[in-house]
Structure formats: C-alpha cells, structure tokens
Image: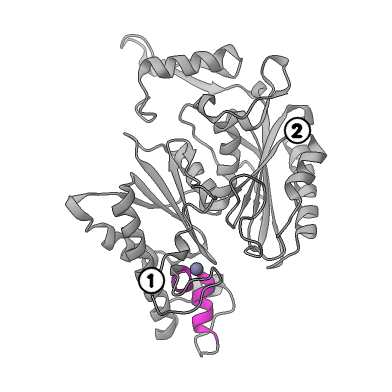
C-alpha cells in the first residue's frame, strides 16, 4: 500500500471491486503470524484472462504471452533485418504468437487483448505511427488490425519507451510516489514517463521525445526537422555516423559497444554522447523531480562509460535534490514486459472475461481500477 500512495480505504475499495469481479485471489501471509492480523497478499486470478505482448524493434520482433497473475507463460524472439517491411514483420509476429500461445497452453478463449510496442512515436488516438517513416517499413502497418482480426481481441499500440517505463513501474513501484523515467539509449534515444501505473503521453503522443532536445544549436540536421538534436550525438546510429569513414568506424551498435575503448576516436565519440545525454537528462530531472531514472537499451552495454557521467551530473541537482539511477534489470525485455503490463493496468481498453462475461468495457480511464503493485518474473523460456 505504501507504494500506491493510496489510503487504506481506497485500496480496500479497489481490491473489493476486483474481488467482486472474480479477478483476484487472496492469500494470508504466514510470516505475520503472532503479530496481529496477518497481512493479506493478493494476486490477479488466472481466470481473469491472458494477454499478448508484441515488441517491434529496429532489428527484432518479440512476442510474449502472459496471464493476468503477471506471469510470462511463453516468449519468442526473432531477429529481423534492419528496415524490414511491415508485411514480413507482421507474418513473423502472427507466427510467433501462434507458437507462443501453443507453448503456453493457452486457449484462445482466455485472451483479453494485445499490446504492441513500437520503437517510434505512436499517435495517441490511433494504432498508427505518429511520424511516417520513423520506423522504416512500418508506416501504415496493419499489424494491430491483423492481430485483432486473427484472435478477435482489442489491440493497442504504444511507444516502446513508454512501455519500458510502465514495465519498470510495475516491477518496482516508486516508494512514496514520484515519476519513474525510462530512458531507452539504443539506435535512437527515447524516454517514457510512468506516473504511478499510468503512462504520460502528451497531447499528440510525443511526450518524452527526449532525443530531439537541442544540444548543439548549429549542429547537424536531424530527421525530425530540427538541428543538433541529442540523439544525433548520444544515440547509437548517431555515434556510428560520426565514426563512419574513419579508421575507428564500427559496423554495428554491438560492435561499437564491445570496442568502445578500442581507439581514442571511438572513446571520444562515446564520451561526447554520454556527456550530452547526462546534461540533457539532468535538465529533465530538474523539471520533473522524478523518483527514479532507469536506463535501458543496447547502449547500456557501455557500462560505466555511459552511467558514470549521468551519475555525476545527477549528483549535483539544485537544492540538494536526489534521484535514484539504475540500469534496467529487465534489459531488452522492458518494453515487452511493459506491454503485458498495459493490458493489466488499462483493463478498460480490453475484454472483460471475469464471471463468464465477455464484453469489451467502455473506454473510461477515470474509472479503470488501479492494479496493486505487481512483480513480473523473468520469462520461463526465451528464444534468442
Ligand atoms: Zn531531432
């Protein structure tokens, strides 16, 4: 309860509502024996349904099937060529879902919905990319419609960094409240903001497009229409471009990460990017006063080269303010786990299978029940 920031009466009321709908089971904690009334532990009941999560990255598609007692039942990862076309990606996703459902032993009748994570801004009022061309090959994708049609369930599309923030917030809620920021440091730079169990999306779905804050006013032209954006320097693609044509050029982000210390030129580009990220992230921390900043994405493989400059800058916030900094323990799975979490925390957008009823609930965010703090265990099986 301390994690939710809600009063005991509010928590009891929400849990009562979930209980009436047959969505939770209660277990008494043995540890509390002899010390007054034992604490109740509640879990979402398996009968509440199962969900599908899909993560479309620049070079992979991943699928997970989980039940609403927050266990990942099956998970598949497939490598896809960079810039792969949506038609091919959609075929991979549909086949991976079929396999994951079979592996999980899930009956299609149990499914309540699917959430799709995209490494691009997603328009708040649709399942489409907010910026055409940002994920090459996926503009006007009908993935959401294909999954919805195949399994007869609502499908919601969401930005990957937003889902990363939600995954982190569910795995370890901020004690005493405060926002959790998830910074995806990969080919590009993304940022998600979780306020409690809610994602902050902004008016157009661009909230957290942190990669496009200006760090060099007269810098390179960015694809977003501005100049000198953070991700041109701190994103993996930007670093590769800056090294291209030099003796220190790297073939790929994994190559750059593995050999970041291999030459003075590589080290200079990496340090320059990390410093720019540290300064910009500190500005965000000054504005939002978050409880925790979590770093995710491929470039976290740089370790101290990335984390130390950020830790140093965040150590000098105004008024002696402090913020927790950590590298995501969920790793590459943060957005996938967050996608399952979206189905848990925004049930009004999906199907209600409680008490034998199968009716889509009206979308009314204000009356969606809050979920209790959840822990999301590691996948039982992952296919590299
Ligand atoms: Zn930009």
Considering depth in this image, is 311 or 156 the residue closer to the camera?
156
- At which x and y percent is residue 260? 45, 76
**Location of residue 268 by image quarter:** bottom left
> Is the stretch drawn in magenta largely helix, strand or loop?
helix
Q: Name the residue under label 1.
A: 215
- Specify the quadrant that holds the N terminus: top left
Give the extent of the magenta segment. 231-244
Residue ID for mark 2? 105
Which residue is painted at 79% across and 43% down in the image? Answer: 98
Front residue of this view, candidates 317 and 245? 317
Instruction: Examine the structure image and report whether residue 233 is included in the region drawn in magenta.
Output: yes
Q: Is mark 1 on a helix, strand or loop?
A: loop
Q: What element carries label 2?
A: loop
- Indicate whether 175 appears above or below 37: below
- The part of the image, by quadrant, that contains residue 357 is top right
Q: Quadrant of the C terminus?
A: bottom right
State yes or no: discs 2 and 1 in contact (Cβ < 8 Å): no
Asked whether, in this view, residue 367 is left or right of residue 214, the answer is right
Q: Which of 99 and 133 is in front in this view?
A: 133
How many residues crowd around disc 1 within 10 Å: few (fewer than 14), some, or many (20 or more)?
some
Q: Which callout, 2 or 1, points at the residue further toward the start of the chain?
A: 2
Residue at the image point whose x is 50% and y is 20% from the top: 42
């Amino acid at each position: 309860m301390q994690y939710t920031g809600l009063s005991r009466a509010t928590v009891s009321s929400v849990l009562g509502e979930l209980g009436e709908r047959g969505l939770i089971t209660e277990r008494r904690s043995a540890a509390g024996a002899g010390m007054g009334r034992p604490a109740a532990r509640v879990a979402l009941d398996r009968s509440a349904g199962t969900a599908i999560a899909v993560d479309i990255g620049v070079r992979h598609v991943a699928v997970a099937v989980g039940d609403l007692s927050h266990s990942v039942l099956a998970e598949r990862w497939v490598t896809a060529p960079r810039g792969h076309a949506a038609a091919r990606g959609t075929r991979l996703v549909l086949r991976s879902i079929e396999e994951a459902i079979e592996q999980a032993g899930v009956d299609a009748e149990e499914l309540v919905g699917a959430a799709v994570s995209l490494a691009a801004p997603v328009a708040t009022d649709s399942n489409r990319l907010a910026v055409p061309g940002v994920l090459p090959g996926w503009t006007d994708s009908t993935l959401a419609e294909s999954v919805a049609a195949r399994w007869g369930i609502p499908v919601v599309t969401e930005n990957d960094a937003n889902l990363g923030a939600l995954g982190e917030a569910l795995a370890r809620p901020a004690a005493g409240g405060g926002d959790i920021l998830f910074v995806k440091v990969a080919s590009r730079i993304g940022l998600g903001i979780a306020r409690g169990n809610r994602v902050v999306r902004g008016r157009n779905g661009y909230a957290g497009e942190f990669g496009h804050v200006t760090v060099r006013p007269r810098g390179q032209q960015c694809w977003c229409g501005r100049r000198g954006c953070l991700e041109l320097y701190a994103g993996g693609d930007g670093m590769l471009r800056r090294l291209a044509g030099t003796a220190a050029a790297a073939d790929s982000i994994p190559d750059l990460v593995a050999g970041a210390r291999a030459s003075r030129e590589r080290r200079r580009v990496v340090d320059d990017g990390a410093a720019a990220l540290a300064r910009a992230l500190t500005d965000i921390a000054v504005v939002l006063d978050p409880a925790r900043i979590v770093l995710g994405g491929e470039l976290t493989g740089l370790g101290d080269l990335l984390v130390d400059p950020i830790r140093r800058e965040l150590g000098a916030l105004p008024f002696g303010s402090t913020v927790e900094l950590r590298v995501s323990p969920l790793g590459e799975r943060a957005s996938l786990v967050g996608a399952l979490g979206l189905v848990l925390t925004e049930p009004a957008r999906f199907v209600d299978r409680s008490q034998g009823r199968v009716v889509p609930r009206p979308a009314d965010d204000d009356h969606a029940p809050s979920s209790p703090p959840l822990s999301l265990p590691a996948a039982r099986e992952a296919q590299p």
